[in-house]
Image: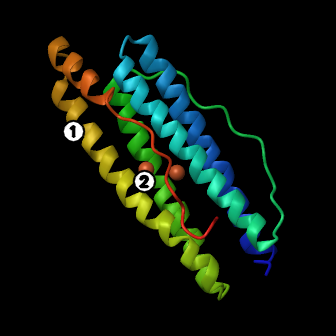
């Protein structure tokens, strides 16, 4: 039950963006680690792992539908930020862009009359709500810590508590 070339192409583009997101968060994790913020680095590493799951979900869906998986080169992310707050601000900005891309993909599925693809994307639409909420909280908290070493240290310990439990994307297994 193929999706057809137009929708399959758009899914493949989103796979590339999810892998780019993974790269971006991995780069942020490495940079935060260099800044002696192992907790924030861990948080970003978990985010990197989540993005891999997002990409894998779309790959599996293309396979399920019998559409072609077209893996494309992943753009190199930036490697440095001016402060932890700056990195978290850019992460939020990036997630807002991802929300727009997911919405566009859902609109295309609607226009193509592909109800199955549209329903599959529900999980991604809801995931973006969570991503933006987390991103907004990050910006508030790192903004509040400001340049105060004790505040940054406490926040870093808090961020280091994030663990990775892979999301189960429905309808794939
Ligand atoms: Fe994602
Ligand atoms: Fe998430």
Residue plotted at (36% across, 25% down): 40
Is there any visible trace of residue 65 in the rendered image? Answer: yes
Residue under label 1: 140
Residue plotted at (16% across, 20% down): 151
Residue plotted at (31% across, 30% down): 161
Where does residue 87 sit, x and y in percent of width and height? 40, 30
Frontmost residue, 92 versus 54 = 54
Residue farthest to the front?
173
**CA gap, disc 1 and disc 2:** 16 Å
Q: Is residue 37 above or below residue 166?
A: above
Where does residue 49 sit, x and y in percent of width and height? 54, 39
Rate crowding at label 1 as few (under 14), some (14 to 19) or many (20 or more) other CA atoms within 10 Å.
some
Where does residue 149 sit, x and y in percent of width and height? 19, 12
Q: Is residue 29 above or below residue 108?
A: above
Q: Is residue 24 above or below residue 170?
A: above
SS at mark 1 in the image: helix
Q: Which quadrant does the N terminus fall into? A: bottom right
Residue 165 picture quarter: top left
Where does residue 5 sit, x and y in percent of width and height? 81, 73
Left or right: 61, with 124 as reference point:
right
Q: Which quadrant does the C terminus fall into? A: bottom right
Is tag 1's residue or tag 2's residue first in the polypeptide sequence?
2
SS at mark 2 in the image: helix
Residue under label 2: 96
Frontmost residue, 51 versus 12 = 51
């Amino acid at each position: 039950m193929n999706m057809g070339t137009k929708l399959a192409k758009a899914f493949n583009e989103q796979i590339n963006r999810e892998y780019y997101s993974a790269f971006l968060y991995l780069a942020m994790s490495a940079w935060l680690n260099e800044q002696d913020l192992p907790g924030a680095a861990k948080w970003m590493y978990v985010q990197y792992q989540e993005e891999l799951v997002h990409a894998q979900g779309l790959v599996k869906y293309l396979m399920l539908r019998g559409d072609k998986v077209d893996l494309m080169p992943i753009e190199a992310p930036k490697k440095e930020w001016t402060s932890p707050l700056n990195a978290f601000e850019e992460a939020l900005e990036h997630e807002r862009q991802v929300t727009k891309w997911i919405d566009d993909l859902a609109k295309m599925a609607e226009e193509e009359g592909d109800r199955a693809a549209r329903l599959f994307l529900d999980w991604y639409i809801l995931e973006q709500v969570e991503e933006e909420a987390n991103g907004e909280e990050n910006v508030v908290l790192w903004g509040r810590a400001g340049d105060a070493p004790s505040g940054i240290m406490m926040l870093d310990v808090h961020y280091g508590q994030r663990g990775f439990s892979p999301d189960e994307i429905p309808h794939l297994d």
